[in-house]
Amino acid sequence: MEARVENGGSCEVGKSGWGKSLPVPSIQEIMRSDSQSVPQRYIHENKDRPIISEDLADSPEIPVIDFSFLAKGNEDEVQKLHLACKDWGFFQVINHGVKEEILEKMKAAVAAFFELPFQEKKKYAKAENEIEGYGQNFVVSEHQKLDWSDMIYLFTLPSQNRNFKFWPLSLPGFKEALEEYSREMQKIAEELQANFSVLMGLKRDGLKRLQGGELKQGIRMNYYPICSRPDLVLGISPHSDGTSFTLLLQDDDVTGLQIKHNEAWVPVKPIPNSLVVNIGDATEIQSNGMYESIEHRAIINEKKPRISIATFMFPDDEQEIGPVEAMIDDQNHPKLYRNIKYVDYVREKFSRKMEGKAHTQFAKLSTR
Ligand code: OGA
Ligand code: NI
């Protein structure tokens, strides 16, 4: 097994208590100075390399959910949502009611941030013992392969969790765009959570109550520079999200996200102005495996950089999560996961490199 950096590393986990990650170079900066280079640390082993194909016509489409029907309580749409979560763990949400202008402002704010000179961005750099700020996460060893992306991660809700020292406040419009976007994502997330509750045999507010109130929120903004050899690298390594669920806003015209479906990598072809939603590990645990978090990764484009904005929705740190009663039936559906304090789960996730669903073992009960 890969050597892990335990707490005995160079420093203790910082204030958020979630984890830490070793400092890495900015791949965007490396590309700015030499767009043809492909440094060794980024070249993945053969078995992990992606197949780059321009022709996506034959690949399957992930399910599409019409949010306006869900919000009206349409039973057929709720059933569609159930199948999307059960069979795919990923779906695209259309008619979500968020104004296009808000999405565009958010994308523009993120683009403007990554366009800043490196010296400027560095002011918001994460500390080695934190996961919040500009840099990269999930780097636990000097030997692991690195992902072809830079990111900035910010806690957004509840608002008292905001650490403005990591926010690029000098960038005009950034704060306003992010705050407005964050509010809109929260509204969508609440409706989705209410539906998940009902589908798990609870009242609409069931999951909310089990999770210690309103969902918490953090937003990870990803920048994927171009690469002259996209067949050798990965924008983000295969992983599942340690969230309740995630809402992803992606570039309308650069396909990059791929999900593991029936043992194959399936591209998520962007529908303009839609949001991609994926089930996270906490929902897998709470649904006792009815809805599984799905492995996904991002590949790199040779000609166009790509931006994506992942809004992570998660329970309160101190809350214990576990399979909800209605999802356990000793005869047919024995309890598959143990109850675990959310922050303990997150710490485990951030103490490892991204490696598919390996970290989810931490919550599994042994079944013989
Ligand atoms: C993530 C993620 C995918 C993408 O940030 O967790 O999976 O397409 N991003 O950027
Ligand atoms: Ni992800």
Image (spheres, rainbow, N blue to C red):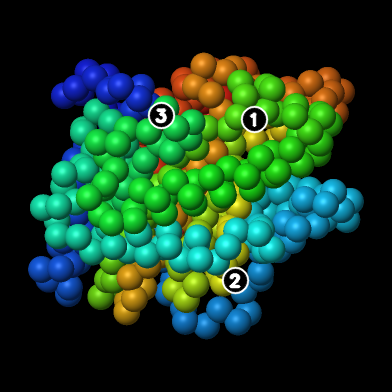
Q: CA separation, marks 2 and 1?
A: 30 Å
Identify the residue at the far right of this view.
75
Near-viewer residue (101 or 207) = 101
Say whether disc 3 or disc 1 marks the residue closer to the N-terminus.
3
Give the residue displayed 58% in from the left and 43% down from the top: 186
Would you say 209 lies left or right of 75 here? left
Q: Are marks 2 and 1 in contact (CB under 8 Å)?
A: no
Q: Amino acid at mark 2?
A: Ile
Q: Secondary structure at mark 3?
A: helix
Q: Which mark is residue 285?
A: 1
Foreground: 37 or 368?
Answer: 37
> x, y (%) of residue 119?
11, 52
Q: Is residue 146 above or below residue 352?
A: below
For discs 3 and 2, the disc positioned in front in the rendered view? 3
Q: Which residue is mark 3?
A: 161
Q: Distance from label 3 to label 2 (Cα)? A: 32 Å
Residue highlighted by disc 2 = 271
